[in-house]
Amino acid sequence: MSTYAVTGAASGMGRAVAEKLTAAGHTVIDVDIAEATVQADLSTPVGRREAAAAVLERCGGRLDGAVMAAGLGPAPGRERPRLIAEVNYFGVVELLEAWRPALAAADDAKVVVFSSNSSTTVPMVPGRAVRGLLDGDIDRVLGALRIFGKQAPTFAYAASKIAVSRWVRRTAVTSGWAGAGIRLNAIAPGAVLTPLLEKQLATPAEAKQIKRFPVPIGGFGDPGHLADWVVFMLSDAAAFLCGSVVFVDGGSDAWFRADDWPRGVPARRLRSYLNRMRELRR
């Protein structure tokens, strides 16, 4: 049996994943702000360091995988954009970077990061905010979001999910990850009936906007079904899965972006494409 770290394990999809892994006989080191084996506030650098260290101590320096399900939604509030950026991006990247040696020690570890279809379905997300996250510059992120006023949390959420998806794809194929036997991928759910969504649906104004959003198959996702996808992505069957973002959203991404990809390599990218081929051979 394997040992997995699961963040956001106290509720929603993270809890569903932790329950399924535990039921299968695996050891789960659950991480959350409360009601978890490792209790830490991932919105602060200190909390992230404490969480990373506590998991490493409990796993004895070897992790067979990790599921990064902790995240904050776009609720209102002046401080919300900062909290979203801290938890949804840095709460993933900093913990995984700290756990990388323990994941490499397992030889064939697998990591699943929770992204969102907000990464492709929210228009006008400022690129400066995304780049700020990837560069670790929280002040630049907040500066780029300030113009959105009360809607800033929505754009902070989408920016955090774009940034974490790009980090996954950039990082997954490097020698320190793929080269060390670690399979790093992301899952991008749509509207899933978690306690967070239920709370939003209880507010008439928010419920109206949520129900207007196109979901071709209708309804909402089930946390247990999403957990099944994650368990599959942690399994031996996913050994060839690397740097992928898997959309499980009832068709919303395809509704908006059906013709955006796959796309061939354009002529203007040929030189960089050939350079990348040479880099891997080296």
Image (cartoon, helix red, strand yellow):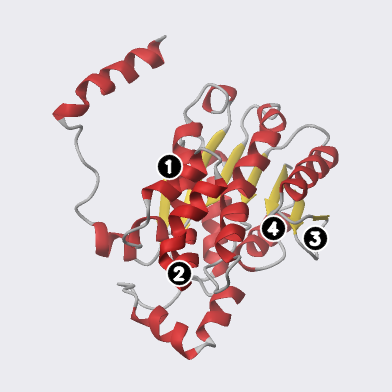
* Amino acid type, residue under disc 4 in the picture: Ala
Residue hosting label 3: 36
Q: Which mark is residue 69?
A: none
Residue hosting label 2: 149
Could you give the CA–CA distance between mark 4 and mark 3, rounded to whole angstroms? 11 Å
Residue at disc 3, secondary structure: loop
Position of 116 relative to 12 (above/below): above
Could you give the CA–CA distance between mark 3 and mark 1, rounded to whole angstroms? 29 Å
Q: Is residue 141 among what the camera can see?
A: yes
Residue extending furthest bottom? 204
Label 1: how many Cα within 10 Å (few below 14, some 14–19, many 20+): some
Residue drawn at point x = 20 percent, y = 23 percent: 270
Judged left or right of residue 255, residue 5 is right
Q: Which of marks 3 and 2 is nearer the N terminus?
A: 3
- Image coords of residue 205 (percent x, y): 44, 87
Residue at disc 1, secondary structure: loop
Q: Which of marks 3 and 1 is nearer the N terminus?
A: 3
* Amino acid type, residue under disc 3 in the picture: Ala
Q: Which of marks 2 and 1 is nearer the N terminus?
A: 2
Residue drawn at point x = 34 percent, y = 61 percent: 121
